[in-house]
Structures are given as structure tokens and as C-alpha cells.
Amino acid sequence: QVQLVESGGGLVQPGGSLRLSCAASGSIFSINAMGWYRQAPGKQRELVATITSADSTMYADSVKGRFTISRDYAKNTGYLQMNTLKPEDTAVYYCNAVVTHTSRSVVSYWGQGTQVTVSS
């Protein structure tokens, strides 16, 4: 089993910044990819950004140039730096990790979510 613990959410004014963290722990052989998704009230969950084990990144058009995804391999932790935040970025942000276990099985895990609210 793997646990993903997110942190860093909160209330911020428009134009402000937040940094989300996602720490993975458990029977991890390797983390193939990590991603951040978000879900606003009344909307479907959407992809925000992903990063692979080769450090290849992908971003939703709505966050390109404002958000940066990264990871610390030694700490099994992923990050989402969010700058120039807008009210429309308000959502619950979820971390996802595709993990290869020590048994070599591959499983996708989700964190519990962290609230980000952008408001004046």
C-alpha cells in the first residue's frame, strides 16, 4: 500500500502564490509519474499537470506559464508551484502517483485532496 499526503493548500488573494506538496510513502520501488488534478464545485475533475520519471512535464492550457510541477526523487515527493493565481483556480487539488511496488505491480494512487481558494 502507498499513502499520498498533500499539503500547502489555503486561501490566497488573486495574483498570489501557493506551493502544494504530495509526499508518498509505503511499499514503493519507484514512482513512474506524478500528477495534480483539481475539481471545482459542480465540475468534473480535470488534469492540471503531470511529470514522468524522465522529468517530462505536461500542463493544462489554463495553467501554462503560471504553474510548475516538480518532484524530489529522494523524498518521493511531488510539488506544484502555483503563481499568479486566479479565482478560477479555486478547487480541491488532488495528487496522483503511478507507483511500481517492490512486488513490481503497478498501481495508481490518489491523495485526499487539499483546498485552494483564490479570493479577495
Image (spheres, rainbow, N blue to C red):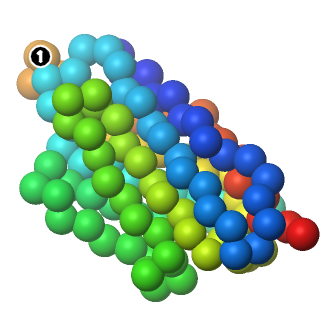
Q: Which residue is situated farthest in the front direction here?
A: 16
Crowding at mark 1 (Cα within 10 Å: few <14, some 14-19, many 20+):
few
Q: Position of residue 6 (x, y in %)?
A: 54, 35
Identify the residue at image location x=38%, y=53%: 35
Depth check, front residue: 56 or 38:
56
Identify the residue at image location x=40%, y=65%: 68
Question: What amino acid is at disc 1?
Answer: Ser
Residue 30 in view here: yes
Task: Identify whether 85 is placed above or below 53.
Answer: below
Q: Count all numbered tags in the image, as a single digit.
A: 1
Residue 100 in view here: no
Q: Position of residue 116 (x, y in %)?
A: 71, 54
Looking at the image, residue 13 sits to the left or right of residue 95; the answer is right
Task: Identify whether 84 is placed above or below 112.
Answer: below
Dividing the image into 4 quarters, which one contains the C terminus? bottom right
Q: Position of residue 45 (x, y in %)?
A: 59, 61
Residue on which disc 1 sits: 103
Tell me which corner region of the image, top left, top right, bottom left or bottom right, holds residue 69: bottom left
Q: Secondary structure at mark 1?
A: loop
Q: Position of residue 49 (x, y in %)?
A: 40, 64
Dividing the image into 4 quarters, which one contains the N terminus? top left
Task: Identify whether 91 is placed above or below 25.
Answer: below
Identify the residue at image location x=51%, y=28%: 5
Q: Which residue is situated farthest in the right direction here?
A: 120
Looking at the image, residue 5 sits to the left or right of residue 72; the answer is right
Identify the residue at image location x=58%, y=36%: 7
Looking at the image, residue 95 sits to the left or right of residue 107; the answer is right
